[in-house]
Each structure stands twice: as structure tokens, then as C-alpha cells.
Image (cartoon, rainbow, N blue to C red):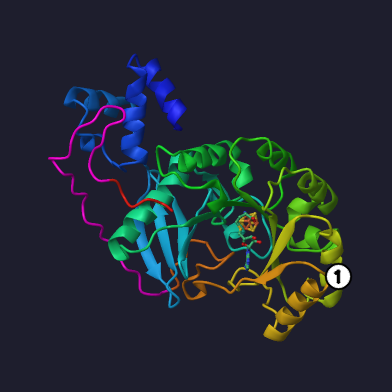
Amino acid sequence: MTLPETEAFAVAQGWAKFRGEQVWRWVHDKRARSFDEMTNLSKAFRDEVAKVATIGGLTVAEVQTSKDGTRKLRLVTHDGNSIESVLIPDGEKMTQCISSQVGCAVDCQFCATAKLGLKRNLDAGEIVDQVYQAQRMLAELEPDRRITNIVYMGMGEPLHNYENLVKSLRILTDDKGAGLGQRRITVSTSGLVPKLEKLGKEDVRPNLAVSLNAPNDAIRDEIMPINRKWNIGKLMAALRAYPIEQRRRITFEYVLLADVNDSASHAAQLAKLLRGVKCKVNIIPYNPHPEAAYARPAPAVVEAFQNECKRLGLPTYLRTPRGDDIDAACGQLANRSNGAAIVPLRIRPRVTDPNAPAGGPEGSGPPPPPPVE
Ligand code: SAH
Ligand code: SF4
């Protein structure tokens, strides 16, 4: 629940409204994982809350660490579904890639997640808990580092889970909780046009990334069946109308597939398509996985494609694969462990300081977890 929803819930239960904020802050600021940790609430009240509410929802089942420092977390939901979330260190930055669904219904031909099909949407609590669990793990393993950026680029199509996406954005950006900056959050979509239009009208404004992946309808129809419903023309019209603030731009992701979309002529079509749109292009050389028959173009082809885009005036960046040795790179998330060493995670139990001053709705409790910067 968002903070206003929790307050309304408290009132509906017959409690004072401030009780909602008290409990909400314990969960989203102080990161309590049980009602018993909420030491400034009476035992009787904690018991009452525990009868009608639950906290969190995910359990960290395993963590794999790549040679390049990328970590993949497998998290299990209360009903036994596995999802994956990836922590990617990059200089001072630490980006977390989070999932929005168990599997995905969009069926892009090059994506391993597609092969799982859609099992179910994650609820907002499960989306948010990926961040909280990763922060706990990081505080334990690398206390000097913080999660600085969040990308909704894990399993699932975020706009197919619209209500929970928006709710999770509201929770993560609330100053009374994790307080993440909206500019540090990116939502990536395969291009669900009506939902894009809706997102543009929300008061939460994450960065937008669009998985374009093809310069024309013929190729996009083939590799992303969703294009048959909302083709490039409809998608670009929605994006041209999308409210973009000053100094922000849309990111277009372009998975480079050998002999499919990687020629100079494709680069020229792409540059023409994106002319006049405030954007940048991220080229992602295809990450192989057993379920798809595509190939990654040779390095010289990737370089030539990027250079051609740049020559034609497109700001174009090459994404180097991260964590591909543990199947953690873009498009490889499919709940596989590939035989690599899996380190069972042990997080020390929270130490609650019994001497911490008890507070009211604005009060302080045990020391908060490290802030998200
Ligand atoms: N469903 C959303 C977000 C998750 S996919 C979306 O499609 O945007 C995240 C990114 O991974 C997308 O840009 C997608 O095009 C890319 N991707 C999928 N499979 C890939 C693969 N095998 N190699 C490289 N990138 C891939
Ligand atoms: Fe779903 Fe994105 Fe994979 Fe397409 S690329 S199947 S939308 S997760």
C-alpha cells in the first residue's frame, strides 16, 4: 500500500489515521519485516495489525555473483514463484534491475523471459521488496555501496501490470520511505500504446525506455509480435505526445541481432524514424540463451552500426553485457542457475536497539537502513 492507502486502511479499521503512517514508516523507512519489531506500538495494537495485514512478501533464495561483480538474486514469492533481480555495479553507480511480473506475456522472439509465459503479476509490495531485500544484502556484503538507480528491466512487461507499477513508483519515491529520486528510476516497455498514454498523465515521472529493437514494421512484426497490435507508427505518435521534461529524453533500446537488424541501411532507417525525438539509443548486442536461434553480430558489425547511427546524428551508446556468465544480462532472466556456484545468502538478523527513543508518527525508532541516493 502507498502511504495514503495505508492511512485510509487504518481509518477503515477504526484506528486513528496517524496509525497508518506509523506502521507505513516502520515498513518503508525503518524496514521492519515483522510487526513485533515496531517497538513504539503497544503489543495489543501490533497483534491487532498482524491479524489484518502482512509485510513484504519475498524471500531471497539464492545469489549468484558474476566475474564482473554483477549479482543476480533469485527471490521467491509467498506462493512459491521465483523471480530475478540484478545488481549491477558501474563505477560509483549501483543499478538494480527489478522484475514486474513472473514471466512475461509479450513473447519477444529473442527474450528468455518470454519462454516462461506469464505466470502472474507481481503486487506492488513484491516489486518494492526486491529493492529492500537487495539493500539489506548490500549493507551486509558491501557496506560502503548504495543502490543509486532502479530500472524496471527485469522479468515482465511493467505496463502490463500498470496499477502495481504506478503504486510501486509512488512507494519508492515517497520521501517518508525509501525516497528514491524519480530521475534515478527508469521504466522500460515493449510499447503498450494505451498504457504509455496513461503513464504520461501520472504525477510520478520516471524515465522512460522503449524496446524498439527494429527500424521498420516488417522486422518488428517478426521479432516482437506486439508490433502487430501497436505498430511503429502508433508507438512513435504516442511517444511524440509523451510529456518529456527539460533535460530528459526517451531511451530506445535496440537489441542487435546478426543479419536481422544490424546493417547500415537499418541504421539509416532508425535515424530517420527517430529524427526530432528527444532521445538516445542504447545498442544491446544480443545475449545468447538456449531458447532462441539468434546470434550476436561480430564486434566489427556492432561498431559499424553504432558509428553509422552516430554519423546520422543519433546519440548512440553501446551496452556491454553485464553478468552474462550467470545468465543475468538483458534478456537472459529465466530462473536458471546454469551450474555456477550458488551462494546461499545469510543475512544477520536485524539488531533492534532496545534503548532507541520511541516516537510517535514523526518519531524515531531503530537506526534506518542506508539511504538510497
Ligand atoms: N519488458 C520490458 C522490460 C524488460 S526487457 C521491455 O521489453 O522493455 C529489458 C530489455 O532486454 C529490453 O530492451 C529487451 O529488448 C532486452 N532483451 C531481451 N532479450 C534480450 C537478449 N536476448 N539479448 C539482449 N537484450 C535482450
Ligand atoms: Fe517481455 Fe520485455 Fe522479454 Fe519482450 S523483451 S518478452 S516485453 S520481458
Residue 286 coordinates in the image, percent (x, y): 65, 72
> Is residue 168 in view from this perspective?
yes
Q: Residue at x 25, y 34 (%)?
A: 35
Residue bearing mark 1? 268
Q: Quadrant of ligand 2?
A: bottom right
Q: Residue 163 versus residue 350: which sits nearer the camera?
A: 350
In the picture provided, is 95 more to the left or to the right than 13? right
The answer to whether residue 23 is magenta is: no
Q: Residue 281 versus residue 292: which sits nearer the camera?
A: 281
Residue 249 coordinates in the image, percent (x, y): 69, 54
The magenta segment is 339-367
Q: Residue furthest top?
A: 14
Q: Residue furthest front?
A: 246
User: What kind of residue is marked 1?
Assistant: Ala
Q: Residue at x 58, y 72 (%)?
A: 290
The answer to whether residue 359 is magenta is: yes
Q: Quadrant of the N terminus?
A: top left
Residue 241: name its quadrant: top right
Q: Residue at x 43, y 78 (%)?
A: 67
In the picture provided, is 302 more to the left or to the right than 158? right
